[in-house]
Amino acid sequence: MTCRLLAIACTSLLLGACASLPHETGTPANAASAPSNQAIELHTVAERYVSASHVEAELDSLATWPAPDGGTWLIGSAKSTHSLMVFDADSGALLRTIGGKGKSPGQFNRPNGVAVHGDRLFVVERDNHRLQVLDLPGLQPVASFGDDVLRSPYGLWINETAPDELEIYVTDSFMYGERYQIVPPLSELDQRVRRFRVQTDAAGELQIDYLGSFGETREPGALQVVESIAGDPSHNRLLIADEYVPGKFAPEEPRSPHAADSGSTLREYTLDGHYTGRSLPADTFATEAEGVALWSCRDGAGYWIAVDQRNPLTVFHLFERNGLAPAGSFQGHTTGQTDGIALHAASTAAFPDGALFAVHHDEAVAAFDLADIARTLGLAEACTGDP
């Protein structure tokens, strides 16, 4: 594997580096869908703000970072301008923009997924087929990797597996056809998620290994069109958004013959890449399943929040952390056609109980107070900020 690093060392696995992970075929005997979301009441939760519009940006994904001055940054990927936009998470004000189109360090080509761990920002670039690592708060590039295995990467999730050791999951939604609307054959869908190990050595340098790929190659667990991914190590769970919607392809394009008829949903995999046999029910999402995030609360409680990319108003579905039972759904007054979300459970000046941030129509960011969500949906007290 080739890794481009700036003053950073990179190592590769010598055996099996490019092999897919072994995975079970078929559906486990105990497979079952999560409980249906069909009868859940739809609530309205008012946004605390919707930022000014940046029509040219084509915002996609979001991540937060607690700045040294006590503020909180909300970092968004802007695909059309090939840049990153940094907002004040408390107000939505734009603080700075970095990047520009190119392949050099610090430049981007269709940046998509973003994630923060410690004082490092990880950025997925779809059309540069790589991840870049930037330091915070300087936003200076320190590494890039993955360009020898990634084909059309979109989203990522970071799992800290040991001190100074991360496992990074990257969705790779390569497609075929002139308009990239044809899903690959089932035999190739074991490449839908790729894993990397990133270690920091005693000198502060990164050591990066490619750990292979995974994805079910039989229905119904095959990942057709993927972007968002998030995990919960305490439950050995990955939730991966499959955005495939029957009939979405243009009429002149052939529909993938193996695509599931159930439509877009979240599929459950284990952290080692095995499909559990469970997906959210087919009636959960009216449109595409997009952003997904875990809201971790006290005493092991919590909720998954998943985006239903409706227009004019996005619907946010909540599911209990343990069993994925539906816990409520809400929409705002303004926020629509959301792609990425970021869940910031820590206190900020404007959000003592934390906030949910969401992209609005590719051009703005919106903020919901977690306390407002908890009260409106009657969620567990462990998630309300109350003692």
Image (cartoon, rainbow, N blue to C red):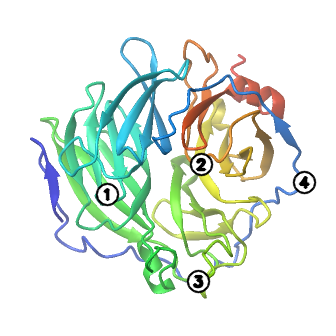
Q: Secondary structure at mark 3?
A: loop
Is residue 305 toward the left or the right of residue 155 in the image?
right
Disc 4/disc 1 C-alpha distance (Å): 40 Å
What residue is at 70 percent from the left and 27 percent from the top?
47
Disc 3/disc 1 C-alpha distance (Å): 38 Å
Amino acid at pointer 3: Glu
Q: From the top left corner, tell me how far across and down residue 103 is, in percent.
A: 21, 52
Q: Where does label 4 land, which residue?
A: 39
Work out whether residue 327 or residue 349 is closer to the camera in this orientation and state it.
349
Amino acid at pointer 4: Ala
Amino acid at pointer 1: Phe
Of badges 3 and 1, nearer the viewer stands 3
Q: From the top left corner, tell me how far across and down residue 212 is, in percent.
A: 33, 68
The label shown at residue 196 is 1
Amino acid at pointer 2: Val
Q: Secondary structure at mark 1?
A: strand
How would you rate the neighbour count of disc 4 (Cα within 10 Å): few for under 14, some for 14-19, many for 20 or more?
A: few
Q: Where does label 3 land, which residue?
A: 252
